[in-house]
Amino acid sequence: MTRPALQLCFHDHCFDGVASSATFLRFYREKIRALDDAQLGFRGLAHKAGALFDADVFGGEENVIVDFRYAADPRLTWWFDHHQSAFETPELKTDFEANQSGRVFWDPAAKSCTKFLARVCAEKFGFDPAPMKELIDWAEVIDGALFPNAQMAVALAEPAMQLMLLIEATKDAQLGPRLIRELSHRTLSDVLREPWIVTPLQPLLERHHKIVAQVGERLDVRGGVATFDVADLDLDNINKFIAYAKDPSALYTVSVTRSPSRSKISLGSNPWKQELRRHNLARIAERYHGGGHPAVAAISFPPERLDEAREVAKKLADELRA
Ligand SMILES: [Mn+2]
C-alpha cells in the first residue's frame, strides 16, 4: 500500500473522535492541501493495558491524533486533545510544552475535542466551521453530557444519539473511516439517513434496550454510588447514563465490562449532580494507568485479568462512598 498523505488517528468507538476527525479533514483540505480519499489513512486508537501506539501508527506523510493521548514522536505533525489525562508521563507533557510547531493543541477544560478543534482551526488558520455546525454541536452535547435529563441520554430517540450508539457498539472497522469521510463534506442530518447507518442500527438498538433492562436488574446503589457488572455480556462500551436514569440519587457509577481486548472499569459521575461531585475521576483512574476527565474516566486491564478489575472496582466504589 502506498503511504497515505494524511493519516488520521482518532479515538475509536467514540462520537467525539469521529466528529473531530471529520472536522479536521475538512479543515485540512480547505486550508492546508487538497487530498482525495485515496490519499487518506485511518487508525482507530483505543485505550488498553500496555503500549498505546504500535510501530506503524504514524505511517502517513502527515499524521494527526485527535481526541487521544499525546505521543512524543517527530512523525506526529498535528495533535488536538481535551483529556485531562493526555500525557502518560511528565516527560510527555514537557515534550508537548517544548513543541514549537504551532500544530499541537490541548485544552482540558474543553467539553468536546470537536468544538475545541473547530475553534482553534478558525482562530489560527482561518477555517470556517459553519457548514459543520450540526455535527460540532452534537459532539459538544454528547461528549460534554449536556443532555436535559438521563432518560433522553438512554432512550436514544434522536438520530444523532443513535449514531453515538452505532459508533460505540459497531464491530465494523470500516464504519469509522467511512463516517469521517462522509461527515467531512455532508451535513450530519444528510448522512444519518443513509441505509448503511439505519440498517445496522436496528439490531444494536434492540440490544441496547435489552442491556438497559439487564443493568437495571443488576444495579446496586449504596451511599450514592451505583455499581454493576456486565463482564459476561461481551461489551467494550456501555451507555454511561443508565444508572442515573434508573436511580437519580446515584452520584457516581462504577461498572465492569469485558471485551476480547480488555477488562475495563468505567468511572462516571451524574451529569445532573455535578455540583455534588467531590472526586476527580481522572486522577483516581491515573493511579491504575487509566485516565479521562474529572467527571468520567476509565481503567483498562488485560482481558484475562477480570478478577483484578473487579477487585479494584470494589475498592474504588468504597472510596467514592466514603
Ligand atoms: Mn472527547
Image (cartoon, grey):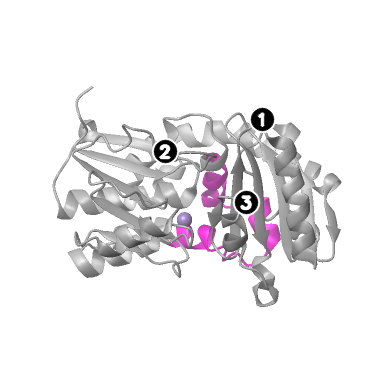
Q: Nearer the viewer, mark 1 or mark 3?
A: 1
Q: Front-most of 170 and 294?
A: 294
Answer with mark 3 or mark 2, whichever residue precedes in sequence: 2
* Residue 250 visible in the current orientation: no
> Which residue in the rendered view is the most extreme toward the left?
33
* Residue 262 visible in the current orientation: yes
Pointer 2 residue = 44
Disc 1 to disc 3, how far (Cα)? 36 Å
> Which residue in the rendered view is the most extreme toward the bottom?
275
Residue type at tag 3? Ala
Pointer 3 residue = 157
Pointer 1 residue = 304
Residue type at tag 2? Gly
Q: Nearer the viewer, mark 3 or mark 2?
A: 2
Disc 3 to disc 2, how far (Cα)? 27 Å
Quadrant including the N terminus: top left
Give x and y (percent) for residue 304: 66, 30
Q: Front-most of 288 and 18?
A: 288
Answer with mark 1 or mark 3, whichever residue precedes in sequence: 3
Q: Is residue 287 above or below residue 7?
A: below
Q: Is residue 159 magenta?
A: yes
Q: Residues within 10 Å of mark 1 (few under 14, many from 20)?
A: some
Magenta range is: 137-166
Q: Residue sitting at 40 percent across and 46 percent down?
A: 190
- Tell me the chief SS of the magenta region: helix
Answer with mark 2 or mark 1, whichever residue precedes in sequence: 2
Residue type at tag 1? Glu
